[in-house]
Amino acid sequence: MRVVLSVLLLIAVACLPFQAAHADTVAEGHALAKAADAQLRGYVDSQVSLTMELVGPSGQTASRALRVRSLETDSGEYTLMVFDTPRDVAGSALLSHNFREADDQQWLYLPAIRRVKQIGARDKSGPFMGSEFAFEDLVTPFYEKFSYRYEQDEACGELTCAIVERIPRDPHSGYTRQRVWIDREHHLIRQVTYYDRRETLLKTYTASDFEQHEGRHWRPATMRMENHQNRRQTRLLWQDFQFGLGLDSRDFTQNALLRAR
C-alpha cells in the first residue's frame, strides 16, 4: 500500500508543472480574446456600404451591394444587413440580435415570398445567401461565448500574431474549434481557421487593409472567406464607414426588417 501511495504521489507531483502550464495558456488565451473583443466595441452605432463578391471554383464572380447598420445595446449588439443589388435579391435583409450572455437571434426577410423567417439554432451553420459566410459568421461573437487556449506566436506579415484556439460554447455551432490569429500590436483579428464537426479544416477567414476611423475604431476594408472543401470564396469589401448616426433599437426590429428596402 505504501508503494502504491508513493507512486500516486510522484505522479501527482509530476503533473503539477503541466497543470500550471495549461492554466497559463488558458489565461493568456482568454486575455488575448478579451483584448481583441474590446477593439470591436465602443462605437455606439454605425453604417457602412458593403460589396459582396462571390468567387466560384473556376474564378467566375458575382457581385452584390449591401447596406449594413449596427447598434450597441446594454446586452449586446444589433445588426441589419440589406441587399440593394442585384435585382433578384434586392430587398432581402438579415436582422441579427447578438447577445453577450444569451443565445443570438436572427431573422431573414425574402421579398420573393414576402415573409420573415427566423433562423433556428440548428440552421445558423448554413450558408448566408449563397456565400461562404455562415449565418453564425455574420455576428461579431462576444469573447464570453468561447473557451480559449493560447498556442504560440508567429509572424503574420510585418507583425507578430498570437495564435489562440477557441472552442464554441454553443452546442449548435457548425464548428468544433477555431484557430485565431491576433496581432500583438493592436489586438486585431487577422485570420481565423474553422474546423467542421468532423474536425476537418473547412474555411479560412482573413482580414486586411485595416483602417482606423475617428482615431479609435479599427476596421478591415477587406475580408475573405475561403472554403477549402468546395474551393469557393467570398470577399467582403467595406467602405464609407459612418459612426454616431443616432440609431436606436426601433431601427432593428422585425418591423424595421420589413421596411428595410
Image (cartoon, helix red, strand yellow):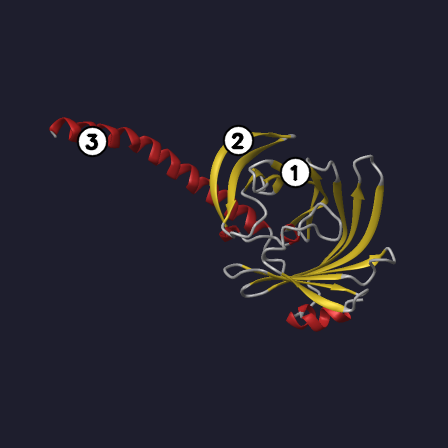
Q: Is residue 201 above or below residue 257?
A: above
Label 3, on which residue?
9
Question: Is residue 20 toward the left or the right of residue 195 in the image?
Answer: left
Q: Amino acid at mark 2?
A: Asp
Residue 204's disc is 1
* Spot occupied by residue 82 in the image (x, y as percentages of width and height): 76, 60
Q: Earlier in the sequence, mark 1 or mark 2?
A: 2
In this view, which residue lies farthest toward the left? 2
Going 68% across and 53% down the picture, which residue do you hit? Answer: 214
Residue 153's disc is 2
Q: Is residue 7 above or below residue 76?
A: above
Going 58% across and 49% down the picture, which residue do you hit? Answer: 39
**Element on which disc 3 rests:** helix
Do the residues under discs 1 and 3 have CB atoms within 8 angstroms?
no
Image depth: mark 1 or mark 2 in front: 1
In the depicted view, which residue is nearer to us: 158 or 127?
127
Q: Earlier in the sequence, mark 3 or mark 2?
A: 3
Figure quadrant of residue 246? bottom right
In the depicted view, which residue is nearer to us: 29 or 35?
29
Q: Cα distance, mark 1 to mark 3? A: 45 Å
Quadrant for the N terminus, please.
top left
Q: Earlier in the sequence, mark 1 or mark 3?
A: 3
**Taking the image as drawn, is residue 243 in sight?**
no
* Spot occupied by residue 26 in the image (x, y as percentages of width and height): 43, 40
Q: Amino acid at mark 1?
A: Thr
Q: Amino acid at mark 3?
A: Leu
Q: Cα distance, mark 3 to mark 2? A: 35 Å
Quadrant for the C terminus, please.
bottom right
**Element on which disc 2 rests:** strand
